[in-house]
Image (tube, rainbow, N blue to C red):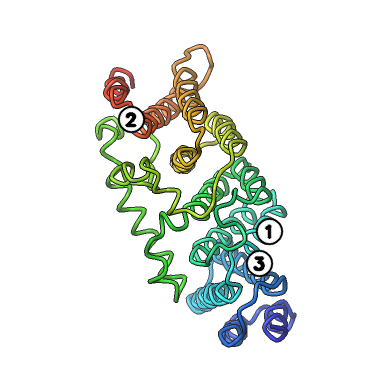
Amino acid sequence: MYFTSSLIKHLDHKNVMKQQGVQVNMVNVATCLALHAKQQASGAMTAVIADLIKHLRKCLQNAAESDLSADVSKQNSDLQQALDKCISELSNKVGDVGPILDMVAVVLEMISTNVLVARTTASAILFAAHIVSVVPNVSYHKKVFPDALFHQLLLAMSHTDYETRVDAHNIFSVLLLRTLLLPWSDQYKETSNAVRSQSISLQEEERDKVEEILDNDLRKDVNHISHPSGLSCQSLDSLKDGAIKSLCSLRLSSHQVNMLLTSLWIQATSTENTPANFEAMTITFNTTLLFSLAKKSNHMALVQCFQLAFSLRNLSLNQDGGWQLSRRRSIFTFASYLLIFSAKISNIPELIPVVKESLTIQMV
């Protein structure tokens, strides 16, 4: 492990930090060393993963902030793939996602207020989250979502940059719904690229299924939210029957559910939201509501979910609030989806046509 750690730390050496071809070779050697290392959930190994995430962030920043030549762009892409593979191999050697989650909380704690740095940091963590989602959960199995990471994700969800907020929501969903949203992960854990491409395919497939919820013509005319890609309506019946208890290895406490719903209300009323932000918030709302079903006393959470939806709906209909009409339409459409999803989950189908009837051109 010492040689692997030394190799990764040497990536910052002044003689190699601008030679990405050399860096690619060094990371590949580190991956080979990790491949033959013993499995151990050590602090040294998670520290190396943290360093790899830092270098992955630099790759993403290089790609975002400058016009790279074809050769340099290819080297940057090769380095990113090498870093992904090394993270994957080291994560498998750790053998427990718990210490990795604790490390991610520390990385998020130091997220910058600089827009580009914050975006690339969140994107790098999201890539890493997809990779480590296949690692067994030993430390936190059937336990509450780690409080330190939960707190940092809540802060990131309220970051000043809208893209960073979207990635924070996605990190939360990937880590919490790891076995539910990624049932194919064992088949693809050899390369992180396959993990990410399969995730994108799954999200597109689920988006197609959910798009039927709202009328197509309305979605064209309204400055609308994109519709959630996290869960298909077809899967709701099995989840309501308690399958989520066996499919997911983490839990949400009542306090965490309350914090999430409160945060969603604050985020939804932000003036800086884009359709991607509403989509991300919708997935988090779905996740929160579904996980509340796994609790014995889930009625309070259901009440809070409906309260959030109706509160946002009433806010969007307030003509004296001074908000732009496009902003009110976005919140109204968002609140309408929350009501429809909550009605499906809580088995109140009578509410769904009432909500849909309000989604008319006249309302627009």
Residue beneath disc 3: 54
Identify the element where label 1 is drawn. helix
In the image, is residue 141 above or below residue 302? below
Pair 3/1: label in front: 1
Amino acid on which the number 2 mark rests in the picture: Asn
Instruction: Return the disc, 1 or 2, that comes first in the chain's sequence.
Output: 1
Left or right of 133? Residue 342 is: left
Residue beneath disc 2: 347
Query: Mark 3 touching mark 1, by CB under 8 A?
Result: yes
Quadrant where the N terminus is found in the figure: bottom right
Amino acid on which the number 1 mark rests in the picture: Val
Instruction: Return the disc, 2 or 3, that comes first in the chain's sequence.
Output: 3
The residues bearing labels 2 and 3 have C-alpha atoms spaced at a distance of 45 Å
Quadrant where the C terminus is found in the figure: top left
**Which image quarter: residue 225?**
top left
Identify the element where label 3 is drawn. helix
- Say whether residue 41 is visible: yes
**Which image quarter: residue 126?**
bottom right
Left or right of 15? Residue 361 is: left
Residue appearing at x 64%, y 76% in the figure:
40
Identify the element where label 2 is drawn. loop
Left or right of 255? Residue 225 is: left
Residue appearing at x 41%, y 55% in the figure:
181
Residue beneath disc 1: 107
In the image, is residue 211 above or below residue 223? below
Pair 1/2: label in front: 2
Residue sitting nearer the eye, 31 or 120: 31
Coordinates of residue 311 in the picture (x, y in percent): 49, 21
